Amino acid sequence: MMQGLPLLSLAIWAPIIAGVAVLLTGGDRNASAARMIALIGALIGFAVTIPLYTGFNLQQGGFQFVEMRTWIDTLNANYHLGIDGISLLLILLNSLTTVLVVVAGWQVIESRVSQYMAAFLFLSGLMNGVFSSLDALLFYVFFEATLIPMFIIIGVWGGPNRVYAAIKFFLYTLMGSLLSLVALIYLYFSAGGSFSLFDFYQTQLPLVVQVSVFIAFFMAFAVKVPMWPVHTWLPDAHVEAPTGGSVVLAAVMLKLGGYGFLRLSLPIVPDASHLLAPVVIGLSLIAVVYIGLVALVQTDMKKLIAYSSISHMGFVTLGIFLFNAQGMEGAVIQMISHGFISGAMFLCVGVLYDRMHSRLIADYGGVANRMPVFAALFMFFSMANAGLPGTSGFVGEFLVIMGAMQVNFWFAFAAAITLIFGAAYTLWMYKRVIFGAVANAHVGELQDINAREFLVLGVLAVLVLVMGVWPQPFADVLHVSVNELLAHVSFSKLPAQ
Amino acid sequence: MTEMQKLYLLVPLAPLFGAIIAGLFGWAIGRRASHTITILGMVVCLVASIVVFQDVMAGNIFNGPVYTWLASGSIRFEIGFLIDPLSATMMIVVSFVSLMVHIYTIGYMADDPGYQRFFSYISLFTFSMLMLVMSNNFLQLFFGWEAVGLVSYLLIGFWYTRPTAIYANMKAFLVNRVGDFGFLLGIALVLMYFGTLDYAAVFAGAERLSGNTIELFPGVPWSLMTVICILLFIGAMGKSAQFPLHVWLPDSMEGPTPISALIHAATMVTAGIFMVARMSPLFELSETALSFVLVIGAITAFFMALIATVQYDIKRVVAYSTLSQLGYMTMALGASAYSAAIFHLFTHAFFKAVLFLGAGSVIIAMHHQQDMRKMGGLAKYMPITYMTMLIGALANAGLPPFAGFFSKETIVEALHHATVPGAGFAYALAVAGVFVGGFYSFRLVFYAFHGKERFADPHHPDVKAADAEAAAAGHDDHGHDDHHAEAHKPHESPAVVWVPLVLLAIPSICAGWLIGSFLYGNYFGSSIMVHPSHTAMATLAQGFHGVIGMMTHALSTLPFWLAIAGAATAWFLYIVRPELPAKLRRQWGFVVTILMEKYGLDRFNDWFFAGGARALGMGLWKGGDVAVIDNVMVNGSARVVGWFASVIRHVQSGYIYHYAFAMIIGILLLLTLAYIR
């Protein structure tokens, strides 16, 4: 019965329609109605993605749940949806994160509640759109549209310097993606007037063109990931964003970049991808090492986690451009795991911020004395952030390091440094914030987390643990897709001479 | 699944169950239920281990998967067990010592608000350690490896309000991570060349790959086995606290004493020794790696023993003694005497647990005072603790017929017969270390248990020195006020404390008598492999004539008399002439300072690595991210756009004649172009 429904469309439009409904509740007088509708919408949005997982055929290659309708006839652009294993995991992550964010913002957001909740629902639907588009123009529209709700979230509910951060975020990412539009239009003509990704995949392109297209895509996706040296928007955005914004930004939005590499760059311009892989790998390793060191000296918890995010996302780009199964599966698993862990880390900081209104490490100390349950959960996520085996944080890093070793010893060497740096910056922060004697009167008055906060963090903790102890169900959905992608990428698309 | 396989699962899962119950529901079920459940779990675990052990001794070796953790590409990563004599021995040691420590904890932690949490942690530790030793593949080994590191971190920082404890636990974790960094790279190389992480498959293919070379630096081919083994050994250096990655272990004494006994003496720190023994089919293929192992072990064994001679903190003496003993085990590994290393691990687990738990008993009696300068003459107040500590010290010093004698003597002899480069150096340091070991062991016994009762005499020069030092350090982190110690006479600890001590003291005496079957009776079978050209243990086997024969033979060897001499020196300095040590310390101030400063390694690490990383991070952040990327590139391009716009803006002036002028110029230009065409 479920098979008959346009599940992907539902995954995109159910949250968006719910968002409209939330907006209709109007001002803050109806805040509780807005919250309730938002929660129901988010839950429905998540519920419709579950049949995607249960109905997903692990053995079948290509794309599943395909929907195809004419969209803009004159451009031959279609409303063409479909998912493979990679998209599936990201859609599930996105829809689940939306539920958690709505719950996390329940009592915390008191002004413009309906707009806040609606922005997250819109964002969720749009990102599902990105993850399921098989038409390049559709992909681009969704990809760009995600900027707007996030821009609003940071700009309206953000901290004191939110306008600078929001504009920096917007311009940085817009600049990146404008070039990719040029590339898409070029490809449209090369593919004989089609925006279908399948046509793009089959189009032969000379190396010079491939390199240009690669660079154009790279600008868009590298900013999103973000890769060094175009990462500086992220710490600012995180610091100013409200907790929910940070969570969605880190947990899902950054993955648009990694996904773009997998869905567009690699299959459309495989030769250029191979040619420029050393550059991307180099930048990724700089992210792991350089950013790890920068994270160490941060005094603001959110900034520290933002830098840690960049460092962990370095594993994603590293894994993708190793061109082997361990690397690529590791990269996707790292994206999912990072979604859980970074989301949880930002939520943990949010818990503290809601109580103390400070993100500075120096304002804390001895929190464990007052918030033992929170301290235990935060410890768990910190260890996961440091890549402890048995948590999801280990799986992706492990696979990518194994994959890197097969390419070059020193790639693995540099990547494995995260074992030390990751533990150093995370545990040092934890020590200064959580351990020790009660540092000041404000800490002394802290209340431990309530049921709502426990629920959100608890769900994430279970996911992190399950994925660490038994990642096989997550990896299973990837195998066929990753193998197909690797096979596709191994064939040259240079025109025959 | 056979009955025996269910039993294999039961061994780690019973402690895990206890840990989960005590950890998650300890607040609800209370103290008594928490310790009952965890201890029951440990009893089940020990009984199951013994049954498994007997089964293995009957010749039933098991190697098989439990579940597939992850499959990627053509590689399957599995969780599975390898149950052979090596792992079965480790299971017995771990579960027995752990059970003793569980019981002891009831007494030691009686007043602690984190009682349930503590039981949960030590059970979780036991689970992790068992998963480590029972593993049949590198991945699960790494899991257990890091998991025991995590629990060690949690337990060192158990008293999380103490600044020293939370510094020590972070240091322990990070130093271990440095080792794990090498370890993981070693595992990655194994996976790359063997295509699997399964022990059996890797060991089967090792011989075939022994001729391979790898060029980490272009044009410099290194033996693949050497690179793999050294990387794996770096992991062992972290976990088993070998120089220069040993720095975390002395600081780990900030944790409660029961875990010092269980984790930082008997079991976790021996994981590195176990791992190298497990990897003997790989290490045997690289003389270079063995040599490296040997030299690192020798440095650790001797130089750490020296530090033990000047420490006042009773736990630190035992901690440095542990470092030294681990060095002996490592040397044995380097000399291809894997069985001797495991034998020493086995005997050491008992007598070091006795020494730590005995030290803990003293610490309880002294109201959490750990400074030996404030002790003295305790023997008559706590006779059971004294007797067990004495047994521990005798075993630690390596005197017959105590357990440590047989294992240590075997190691020294094996080094004598070893042929790998560096064996002579290692032998010399090992023999010298025996003297030092005899000295520091008996220094502890005489200083704490004999002589003047300094705890009752605040004006004794030693006590004054200790107080001055504590005041200078500005910390009184022992939780209790020291002045109260004078009011009470120390007394023997309760039965939950001394019963485990006695139960551990028994094997500290007689575990060594198993040497015949352990080392020379093909006990380990196929679980340890020695290359035919490494003949040390084979030579010893020929000269072995039973336990009594070994003891009588010892009377004519140098190490025995050196140990006696060490003990006698301690007796002379701390019983006959108790004023002499202070005088010697003044005369040899320079040497003592070097030892008290632990050869300056901690300072160097703090300055170079910790400070260096922070400085570099600050430089990259302020210089790279803020100055170059943000200011020049991002805001810079914004400024350029702004500047450009401010120039262009002048064009749009609003004056009709400006526009008209521009139009005329434009038309002229167009006409000119058309004309030229």
Image (cartoon, coloured by chain):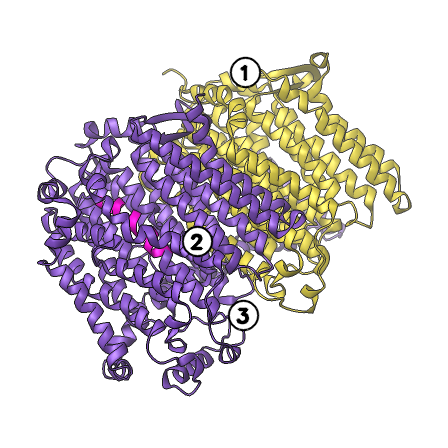
Chain colours: A yellow, B purple
Q: Tell me which segment is drawn in magenta.
A: B340-353
Relative horizontal placement of residue A497, taking residue A28 as reference (left or right) = left
For image coordinates 23% across by 30% down, the residue present is B206
Q: Disc 3 marks which residue?
A: B479
- Label 1 SS: loop
Quadrant, the N terminus of chain B: top left
Q: Disc 2 marks which residue?
A: B173
Q: Are marks 1 and 3 on the same chain?
A: no
The numbered mark, 3 or 2, whose residue comes first in the sequence reads 2
Assess disc 3: are there few (<14), some (14-19) or many (≥20) residues with their C-alpha within 10 Å of its C-alpha: few
Asked whether the viewer can see residue B430, the reply is: yes
- Dominant SS in magenta: helix
For image coordinates 70% across by 39% down, the residue present is A100
Residue type indicated by callout 2: Phe
Q: Which chain does the numbered disc 2 sit on?
A: B
Cβ–Cβ under 8 Å for marks 1 and 3: no
Q: Residue B57, how many percent across, how many down?
A: 30, 31
- Residue A23, quarter of picture: top right
Q: Residue A232, how many percent across, how many down?
A: 55, 50
Residue type indicated by callout 3: Gly
For image coordinates 88% across by 46% down, the residue present is A28
Q: Which mark is residue A62?
A: 1
